[in-house]
Image (cartoon, rainbow, N blue to C red):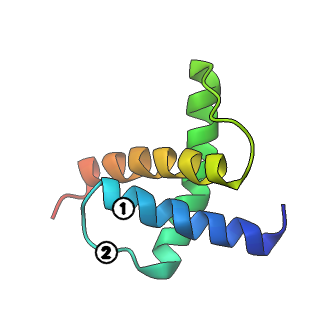
Amino acid sequence: MGILATLIIGALAGWLGSEFYKGSGLGLIGNIVVGVIGSIVGSSLLGYLGVSLGDGWISDVLTGAIGAVVILFIFNLFFKK
């Protein structure tokens, strides 16, 4: 996957994750970072559970969003406002 596709999918996944898990706005860079890291976490978590969302960019965004929600949940456990 190209770097541009990774950034776009990361931004979409981060935005979608932040919509599911309401909190303060992350901005574009924050959404990309949370989405890309969330994709790694989501892939690991879903792989561990034996769940596959299929192939393609939609499943990549959904996997990243699941991971982003997990990251945002853990982040908010430690850094509550």
For the residue marked with disc 1, what is the amino acid? Ser
Q: Which residue is mark 2?
A: 25
- Vertical arrangement, residue 71 with respect to residue 27, above or below: above
The residue carrying pointer 2 sits among few (fewer than 14), some (14 to 19) or many (20 or more) residues within 10 Å by Cα, namely few
Quadrant in which the C terminus is drawn: bottom left
- Labels 2 and 1 touching (C-beta < 8 A): yes
- In the shown orientation, is residue 20 left or right of residue 81? right
Q: Can you name the residue that lies furthest to the right here?
A: 2
Residue 43 placement: quadrant: top right
Residue at image position (54%, 66%) is 12
State the residue in front, 58 or 40: 58
Q: Which residue is mark 1?
A: 18
Amino acid on which the number 2 mark rests in the picture: Gly
Residue for point 58% across, 30% down: 46
Q: Which residue is at the front of the view, 50 or 59?
A: 59
Sequence-wise, which precedes: disc 2 or disc 1?
A: 1
- Identify the image quadrant of residue 45: top right
The correct choice, above or below, for 28 with respect to 70 in the image is: below
Rendered image: mark on residue 63: none
| SS at circle 1 | helix
Q: Residue at x 27, y 53 (%)?
A: 76
